[in-house]
Amino acid sequence: MARESKLIRQTQETDIAISLSLDGSGKADINTGIGFFDHMLNGFARHGLFDLNCEVKGDLEVDGHHTVEDTGIVLGNAIKEAVGDKKGIKRYGSFILPMDDALCLCAIDLCGRPYFNYECNFTTERIGELDTELIREFFYAVSYSAGMNLHIKMISGINNHHMAEAMFKAFAKALDEATGFDARITDVLSTKGTL
């Protein structure tokens, strides 16, 4: 069964269409109106080997907040829908990713219960046209919409571009692991029998 989802979310602030395949090859077509955010989502798709199409029209004349946060909401819902009943998946995923000076840890539990822990102190307010404070808002929205326990910790880093990129790539690698199958898991990986 294909683990795919297609979602559309329209509000007075944003109009978002996302299609996601968890079992892709890393193809992406991203247009959020924020160049650096596009770059991060492209990296997420490529390094997680997800196929991702993301078309966003947001109120960028206000600022980038609604665009970034709402994209996180829709992507989180797309992940949740694509994962499906979670039978046979590993559930947990973690990755420590180096990118030059930056070293980022990401750990995920697809438990159905949202929790978000984030440790990163950017030293610039913006990277390109993306406000760095919105990176936290994006991952918070993904975590709560997907119902995942998500921990992101920047272990070290000097260059803000490297730090952000390491974060998105570490998230991709951890999610790829968590959504991967293990033949020994015949139902869901939980003593409760459900996730």
Image (cartoon, rainbow, N blue to C red):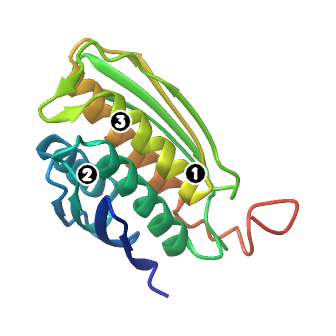
The residue under label 1 is 144
Q: Residue at x 54, y 67 (%)?
A: 80
How far across and how far down the image is residue 105, in percent? 46, 29
> Considering depth in this image, is 103 or 42 the residue closer to the camera?
42
Q: Residue at x 35, y 28 (%)?
A: 133
> Considering depth in this image, is 195 or 77 the residue closer to the camera?
77
Label tally: 3
Q: Secondary structure at mark 1?
A: helix
**Mark 2 to mark 3 CA distance (whole Å):** 11 Å
Query: Seen in the image, is 16 located left or right of residue 31?
Result: right
The residue under label 3 is 135
> Considering depth in this image, is 134 or 186 the residue closer to the camera?
134
| For discs 2 and 1, the disc positioned in front in the rendered view | 1
The reply to whether callout 3 and callout 1 are in contact (CB within 8 Å) is no
**Mark 3 to mark 1 CA distance (whole Å):** 15 Å
Given the image, on which type of amino acid does mark 2 rest? Leu
Given the image, on which type of amino acid does mark 3 rest? Ile
Q: Secondary structure at mark 2?
A: helix
Query: Seen in the image, is 136 located left or right of residue 32?
Result: right
The residue under label 2 is 41
The reply to whether callout 2 and callout 1 are in contact (CB within 8 Å) is no
Considering only order in the chain, which callout, 3 or 2, is on the residue closer to the N terminus? 2
Label 2 Cα neighbours within 10 Å, binned few <14 / some 14-19 / many ≥20? many
Q: Is residue 94 positioned above or below 5 on the image?
A: above
How far across and how far down the image is residue 110, in percent? 62, 55
How far across and how far down the image is residue 130, in percent? 21, 35
Given the image, on which type of amino acid does mark 1 rest? Tyr
